[in-house]
């Protein structure tokens, strides 16, 4: 009688362990899917931001260059430097390999 009881407990325990393993695998798959979707959303947001920032950067570059030529003062061009860094970073994030390098 003890053997039947312990066999039933072992079968129940094995079934429970299999269920837990299956549940853990499903949870990992779901987490990976959620992370991929979040990354896709981040890339999409960056690309959308890049459209607006690229327009702003282009206009600022034209206006600052025109101002520097008219005033004959190259110091007017200094704001283009940090704006170009931001533009390059956003471009690399949206269309380059920045996320792959971060993962690596």
Image: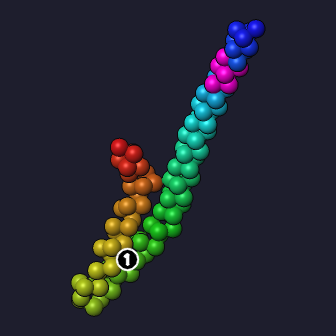
Q: Quadrant of residue 60?
A: bottom left
In this image, 11 relative to 88: left or right?
right
Q: Is residue 56 above or below residue 7?
A: below
Residue at screen point 54% across, 45% down: 35
Q: Position of residue 96 (x, y in %)?
A: 39, 50
Residue at screen point 58% across, 41% down: 31
Depth check: give the residue in front, 32 or 90: 32
Depth check: give the residue in front, 23 or 43: 23
Magenta-highlighted residues: 10-17
What number of labels is visible?
A: 1
The reply to whether residue 3 is visible in this rendering is yes
Q: Within 10 Å of the Cα at label 1, are there few (<14), some (14-19), or many (20+) other Cα atoms?
A: some
Q: Position of residue 22 (x, y in %)?
A: 63, 27
Residue at screen point 66% across, 16% down: 10
In this image, 4 relative to 25: left or right?
right
Residue at screen point 67% across, 22% down: 13
Q: Is residue 12 magenta?
A: yes
Q: Position of residue 78 (x, y in %)?
A: 28, 80
The prevailing secondary structure element of the residues shown in magenta is helix
According to the image, label 1 marks what residue?
A: 62
The reply to whether residue 40 is visible in this rendering is no
- Identify the secondary structure beneath mark 1: helix
**Residue at the extreme bottom:** 71
């Amino acid at each position: 009688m003890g053997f039947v009881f312990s066999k039933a407990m072992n079968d129940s325990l094995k079934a429970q362990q299999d269920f837990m393993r299956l549940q853990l695998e499903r949870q990992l798959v779901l987490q990976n899917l959620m992370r991929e979707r979040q990354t896709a959303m981040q890339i999409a947001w960056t690309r959308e931001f890049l459209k607006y920032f690229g327009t702003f950067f282009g206009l600022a570059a034209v206006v600052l260059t025109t101002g520097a030529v008219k005033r004959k003062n190259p110091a007017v061009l200094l704001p283009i430097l940090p704006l170009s860094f931001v533009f390059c970073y956003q471009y690399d994030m949206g269309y380059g390999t920045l996320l792959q390098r971060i993962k690596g």
